[in-house]
Amino acid sequence: MATNLDPRTDLKLYLPTSVKEMKLLGWDHVDVVLFSGDAYVDHPSFGAAVIGRTLQAAGYNVAIVPQPNWQDDLRDFRKFGAPRLFFGISAGAMDSMVNHYTAARRRRSDDAYTPGGRHGARPDYPTVVYSEILRKIYPDTPIIIGAIEASLRRLSHYDYWQDRLRPSILADCPADMLVYGMGEKPIVEIARRLDAGEKISDMTSVMQTAVMLPKSARPAEDNEENIILHSFDDCLKNKRFQAENFKHIEQQSNRFHGATLWQDHGTHTIKVNPMLPPMTTAEIDASFDLPYTRLPHPRYKGRVIPAYEMIRHSVNMHRGCFGGCAFCTISAHQGKFIASRSKESILREVKQVSRMHDFKGYISDLGGPSANMYGMHGKDLSVCQKCLRPSCLHPKPCPNLNADHGPLLEVYHAADAIAGVKKSFIGSGVRYDLSMHQTGNKRIDATNRRYNEELIERHVSGRLKVAPEHTCPHVLNLMRKPDFKLFYDFKRIFDDVNRRCGLKQQLIPYFISSHPGCREVDMAELAAETKQLNMHLEQVQDFTPTPMTLATEIYYTGIHPYTGEQVFTAIRPEEKLAQRKYFFWYEKTYRSDIIRSLHRLHRPDLIQKLYPGGNNWRK
């Protein structure tokens, strides 16, 4: 590829989005056409660009149709005609329903993945809508679906926005195959096999894919390599079956070598092939080293895409997360094993960022799904390969975990030494329970103490985000988060470093209301405890059930999948609002209501903590 072209304007540096652009590249056909619910940003943080560039590197002509109009004459779906190999569909970097609706199920007024933040550029459930359109127009062309929306809906799942259990998305849309997780390796295998003349209907065992087959294809009984889940029809009749299914789904998603999952849907069965082992350093480097321009396509003529603005000067260092938080989808999609880039690959990208026309010297984030898991893995990988634990940190850090933050510090130091870089910040969430864990190894423990101090002194852009999520022990246990006492310990380090270095930085904690197991009184106690810390909470949210998380299964079924016990969850809107208001105890508009509620809960002690003398407050 030529290096003297301006990526802000030269269309030949991008995957083509029109026939005109295709012809500029000298192509007379396309092998693959990708449809995306997001705007096309040619950046490694945007999945459609990653898949497109990966297929391009494998030798295929790939076109992309971002945010096609599904309401007109469907010209966007027709403009490239039928590709030689297949159509690929991504709803976008977020589940479309999370993108479109708040936790209160209210329609959002904006869309961070659309130019200008404009809402309405994609339908609800684009995976289904796009698939149905393409199948009607091109009945014989294979359709492969992927990205977060399809990935987390690969088996029966609770849909919060419709408030019902839905079947696998493969039962809802006419796609031939679903690629789940990070899809570079499966999509290239599919392309090569189709290119060799194999039929898509014969590809039933591609790793990290799901397909719908006749029920007769399913094994009659469980064995070491196959787990037969309760059928969708049975799950509709009995929520306990759905809870029991989830335990298997989560465990197999987090295994190094998982089993095949089967779930009957009427006369058919969904087969979910095992997740691939984590990418090697060479494999993940190859993905990040593809010739991304790191810019939105010139078709947008400088219009701001909010999601891109957040990450334009950031660098992602690894994939995967072994935290296993009950409300998080990362491990279900990326797995719990960490795939880390080499230091050399990361520094190449930092240099690329430093040459961007608008770079002012500050890397906004050297991070990942969790900022400080780079380079971490089990000391004895053979133990990891047998492990079924969904979290390496809960209920306490695994003794087999290598928690050495030394390699991460080396990357920080090397990035800051690059010409043009004034400072690198850490914008991703930091797992302080990981960096503060006492391993018993004096060298590693000393290194990790230094990591915390250097992080706070050199890599905070005024505010450091951490995620204690709650203060009550029983809620934190359900969340798979550490005791809140650890936050006090970290805050002490944070305050000491700020005082020693003459800094005035803020520690910004994230909290969640209405999480399964949390009652109104627990939120009142959270308010009282955070008030004692002199915190006016900003980064807060009401729990939103999303497919394929432990917390969502508890929300829907009322049952903990691992214990079989009943768990209280605030479900009715008034219950959720009653919890959320305690985040804002300091606002006058909530004060009278909170005092009345605390009287109802027989907790005058909390009234005195929140509003000293407020028991008689009447204004």
Image: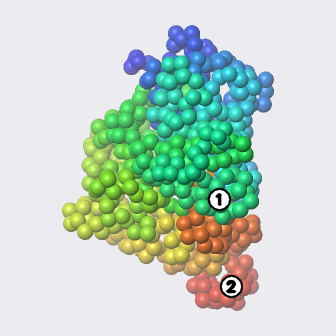
Disc tally is 2
The residue positioned farthest toward the left in the image shown: 443
The residue positioned farthest toward the right in the image shown: 72
Q: Position of residue 193 (x, y in %)?
A: 50, 24
Residue at 61% across, 19% down: 83
Q: Residue under circle 2? A: 601
Image quadrant in which you'd find residue 439: bottom left
Residue at 48% across, 67% down: 481
Q: Position of residue 429 (x, y in %)?
A: 45, 56
Mark 2, other Cα within 10 Å: few <14 / some 14–19 / many ≥20: few
Instruction: Examine the rendering and report whether any part of residue 148 can be seen.
Output: no
**Disc 1 or 2, which lies upstream in sequence?**
1
State the quadrant of the N terminus. Answer: top left
Q: Position of residue 153 (x, y in %)?
A: 63, 47
The residue nearer to you, when weighing 463 against 53, is: 53
Amino acid found under the numbered disc labelled 2: Leu
Q: Position of residue 605 (x, y in %)?
A: 60, 89
Question: Residue 242: which numbered mark, if any?
Answer: 1
Instruction: Examine the rendering and report whether any part of residue 261 can be seen.
Output: yes
Residue at 29% across, 55% down: 380
Secondary structure state at the residue bearing disc 1: helix
Amino acid found under the numbered disc labelled 1: Gln
